[in-house]
């Protein structure tokens, strides 16, 4: 994909696609409940389709309709042994959350995925699951996928997670559905809480206190209607573009603004960004709002500590914003970025440098001295959707032409990304 510098402002309205994290969880919990779950504004991206295909292989009927997905739940113990390995594709959420569910089943199966996911760390879920009595192992004994899971009766534990990770927390809580006693997880900082909110909406007894979430085993989960909010992680690219490109004004409709996900809004406002929340309302168990974004003069900031999990997927686009902002931005406590779909710390430092940014990588983040003009470059996306989208936005504001290699990887989380970006250019 080739991007050239925009000479006109971005203008108009957009409804970004459904939230990826919530879409995955709606299929998973829909499969484990009694009766039908109807999911509207489901994100039909490659990652969420991987989740659907895994549950179909376990005997769950999932119908795609024009505006929704219907999941025919079979109850907590209704999954069937898949005939072949479950393929999670590129999706860490699918692999880590399903592992929790599979550990408590009455059958064995193998979980695999693409080259990227076979390099991502799975010890973070293997360890707590083993303490719950699970029989799970890395088939290549490298603590990565493929994983073999032989379902067992599990025991409840309290897990003090060393990392603030919603995937780890959710994996343990989902395994906790099949335990003999209560299971709880404490994390260093609160990560996204969609699993807790949705489990409770489906009828589970879940308690959240500070950074600890706990679940009582063996609930009866009942099918629900869910409307998935717009994904703030997808909205982030348009928020950044709207703030950076002079004269722009964009309205992003029905974006999920759960406080465990809204760090991008706090950081942008802290950098001087003009973002107004309109029409704030509850949509089921989540809160949504329309975001009015106006071009702003931005300055550098510090991104660190407990805000990190609330914007973990937005750090690449924050680095782009910081490159255009006046002054220095420091990002710390973000070592988790090294184990995402690519090593996002290294990739951002390398590729922003290629565009002329004064940027330095650190142990756990980066230092960006922004405000100098950027020039176009050929960007290797590393097949990482968030890298491709971040550099597409950088390319709109850089001099000359930017080429994003393997840009179709945006389909992992946002199949219509380039179409939506074009629609705002009048
Ligand atoms: C996700 C949690 C985050 C995030 C990922 C989706 C989820 O990962 O980066 O894109 O849906 O639970 P970690 O939990 O590993 O931080």
Image (cartoon, helix red, strand yellow):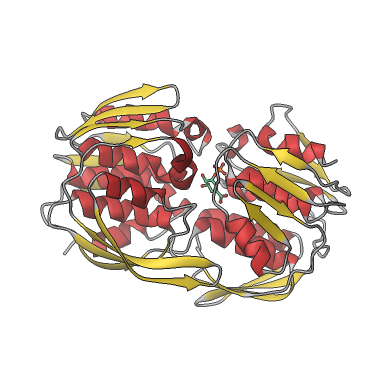
Q: Is residue 382 above or below residue 51?
A: above
Depth check: give the residue in front, 82 or 318.
Answer: 318
> Residue farthest to the front?
209
The residue under the point 67% across, 65% down is: 200
386 sits left or right of 295 in the view: right
Q: How many marks?
A: 0
Instruction: Provide residue 283's location: percent of width, then percent of height.
Output: 49, 72
The residue under the point 54% across, 75% down is: 68
Depth check: give the residue in front, 181 or 120.
Answer: 181
333 sits left or right of 184 in the view: left
Quadrant (top left, top right, bottom left, bottom right) of the C terminus = bottom left
325 sits left or right of 29 in the view: left
Q: Quadrant of residue 197?
A: bottom right
82 sits left or right of 354 in the view: right
Q: Is residue 407 above or below residue 83?
A: above
One can see residue 99 in this view: no
Depth check: give the residue in front, 307 or 77.
Answer: 307
Instruction: Provide residue 329's location: percent of width, then percent of height.
Output: 29, 33
Q: Is residue 347 above or below residue 11?
A: above
One can see residue 237 in this view: yes
The residue under the point 64% across, 54% down is: 208
Q: Quadrant of residue 316?
A: top left
Instruction: Provide residue 273's location: percent of width, then percent of height.
Output: 24, 51
Instruction: Provide residue 255's location: percent of width, then percent of height.
Output: 40, 64
């Amino acid at each position: 994909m080739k991007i050239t510098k925009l000479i006109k402002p971005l203008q108009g309205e957009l409804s970004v696609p459904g939230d990826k994290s919530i879409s995955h969880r709606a299929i998973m919990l829909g499969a484990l409940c009694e009766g039908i779950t109807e999911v509207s504004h489901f994100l039909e991206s490659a990652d969420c389709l991987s989740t659907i295909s895994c549950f179909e292989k376990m005997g769950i009927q999932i119908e795609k309709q024009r505006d929704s997905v219907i999941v025919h739940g079979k109850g907590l113990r209704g999954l069937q042994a898949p005939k072949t390995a479950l393929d999670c594709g590129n999706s860490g959420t699918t692999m880590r959350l399903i592992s929790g569910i599979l550990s408590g089943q009455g059958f064995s199966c193998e979980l695999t995925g693409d080259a990227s996911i076979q390099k991502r760390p799975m010890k973070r879920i293997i360890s707590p699951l083993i303490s719950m009595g699970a029989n799970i192992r890395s088939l290549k004994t490298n603590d990565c996928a493929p994983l073999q899971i032989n379902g067992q009766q599990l025991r409840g534990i309290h897990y003090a997670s060393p990392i603030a990770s919603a995937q780890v927390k959710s994996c343990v809580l989902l395994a906790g559905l099949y335990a003999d006693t209560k299971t709880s997880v404490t994390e260093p900082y609160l990560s996204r809480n969609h699993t807790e909110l949705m489990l409770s909406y489906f009828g589970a007894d879940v308690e959240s206190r500070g950074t600890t979430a706990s679940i009582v085993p063996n609930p009866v989960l009942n099918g629900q209607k869910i409307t998935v909010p717009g994904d703030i992680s997808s909205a982030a690219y348009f928020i950044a573009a709207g703030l950076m490109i002079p004269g722009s004004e964009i309205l992003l409709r029905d974006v999920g603004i759960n406080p465990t996900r809204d760090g991008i809004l706090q950081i942008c406002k802290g950098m001087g960004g003009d973002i107004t929340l309109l029409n704030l309302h509850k949509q089921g168990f989540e809160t949504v709002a329309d975001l009015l974004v106006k071009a702003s003069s931005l300055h550098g900031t510090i991104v660190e500590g407990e805000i990190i999990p609330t914007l973990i997927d937005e750090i690449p686009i924050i680095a782009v914003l910081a490159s255009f902002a006046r002054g220095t931005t420091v990002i710390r406590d973000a070592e988790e970025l090294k184990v995402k779909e690519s090593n996002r710390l290294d990739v951002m430092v390398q590729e922003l440098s290629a565009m002329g940014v004064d940027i330095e990588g650190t142990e756990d983040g980066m230092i960006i001295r922004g405000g100098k003009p950027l020039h176009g470059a050929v960007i290797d996306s590393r097949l990482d959707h968030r890298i491709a989208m971040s550099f597409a936005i950088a390319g709109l504001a850089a001099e000359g032409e930017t080429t994003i290699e393997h840009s179709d990887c945006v389909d992992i989380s946002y199949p219509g990304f380039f179409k939506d970006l074009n629609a705002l250019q009048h």
